[in-house]
Amino acid sequence: MLNRLRNDFRLTIITVCAACASTGILPFAIYRFLAGQYVEGLVDLAIVVGIAVPAIYALVTGRTSAAAWTIALVISAGCVVAAHLLGIAGLLWAYAVLLIVFFLLDRLVAILLNLVTLLGIVLFADAAFDEVFQRFSFFVSASLVSVYAFVVATRNDQQRRQLEALASMDPLTGAGNRRLLEHELAQAAASAHRGRLEPGLAIMDLDHFKLVNDRYGHEAGDKVLVEFAAILRSAVRKLDRVYRFGGEEFVLLVPATDGRGLEVLVNKIRSQVAERLAGPGGPVTVSIGATQL
């Protein structure tokens, strides 16, 4: 469970929302029932259930998209209703809701949902405002919070993508690295067991590549590797995956093919490399071994 939370940011946010709802909102619901405020208590209870049930679903199944949507809609609608029923006491929850929505949904969707939430509060939560100026002040301050949340969420998403790229790509050639290969090999095998076409695998080794490094230096060798990776990407289909296994060894994963298709693809790669790839000492060729699962 801790592993999943560490590796899935959205699942972490969903879990935190559920924990906060249980410890922060549920006591208010209990208090309001005891105080005879049944409508307000039911609203609080509905918000807690509306967060807890999707969170449990996400934790059990690992599917976070539907859970995130449900929680975002529940807390946004609950925020409007709470401001209408409780006045300023309900209005104070709005700022937290505006921030959380950006970490549950895509940024553009979050902007639209937050705008609808703010308009709902400003137009219908009469108990929260004494005059028009207060409505305007709240709308401006809450909009600034949304803008700040948008910037933070955008930056967080960019950094996450950069880290994922660094963790899964070979920095020299732009091909996938060995870690990504192992992960996607397991996925391809699982897809094959579900009755789809079997994947093909090709292992490629540049011939006598050590001589290029020894005679002309590693910079010349790196240039050959980069050009080889570019030739591979231009020769394969969009769904095929290229990885650098180590040194001058590359791996090609062909997710769905038959034996004949794999043979045609391998020969195409071999001929294109022979025609287009060259180092300081002349043409560079490649040896390829390929098979299906």
Image: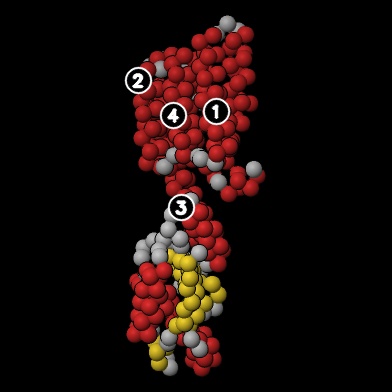
Between 240 and 200, the one nearer to me in the picture:
200
Disc 3 residue type (three-letter):
Gly
Give yes or no for contact between labels 4 and 3 (Cβ–Cβ under 8 Å).
no
Disc 4 residue type (three-letter):
Leu
Separation of marks 2 and 3 at Cα, in angstroms: 55 Å
Q: What residue is shown at x 52% (from left), y 77% (from top)? A: 249
The disc, 1 or 3, on the residue closer to the chain's N-terminal end is: 1
The disc, 4 or 3, on the residue closer to the chain's N-terminal end is: 4
Residue indicated by mark 4: 73
Residue indicated by mark 2: 123
Q: What residue is shown at x 49% (from left), y 15% (from top)? A: 86
Give yes or no for contact between labels 1 and 4 (Cβ–Cβ under 8 Å).
no
Which quadrant of the figure has residue 35? top right
Between 219 and 146, the one nearer to me in the picture:
219
What percent of the width, then of the height, locates residue 95? 48, 30
Q: What residue is shown at x 62% (from left), y 15% (from top)? A: 30
Residue indicated by mark 1: 53
Front of the two marks 2 and 4: 4
What percent of the width, then of the height, locates residue 186? 54, 58
Position of 271 relative to 179 (above/below): below
Front of the two marks 1 and 4: 1
Position of 135 relative to 112 (above/below): above
Question: Few, some or many C-alpha atoms within 10 Å of disc 4 (few <14, some 14-19, many ≥20)?
Answer: some
Mark 4 element type: helix
What percent of the width, then of the height, locates residue 156? 49, 49
Separation of marks 1 and 2 at Cα, in angstroms: 30 Å
The disc, 2 or 3, on the residue closer to the chain's N-terminal end is: 2
Residue indicated by mark 3: 195
Separation of marks 4 and 3 at Cα, in angstroms: 38 Å
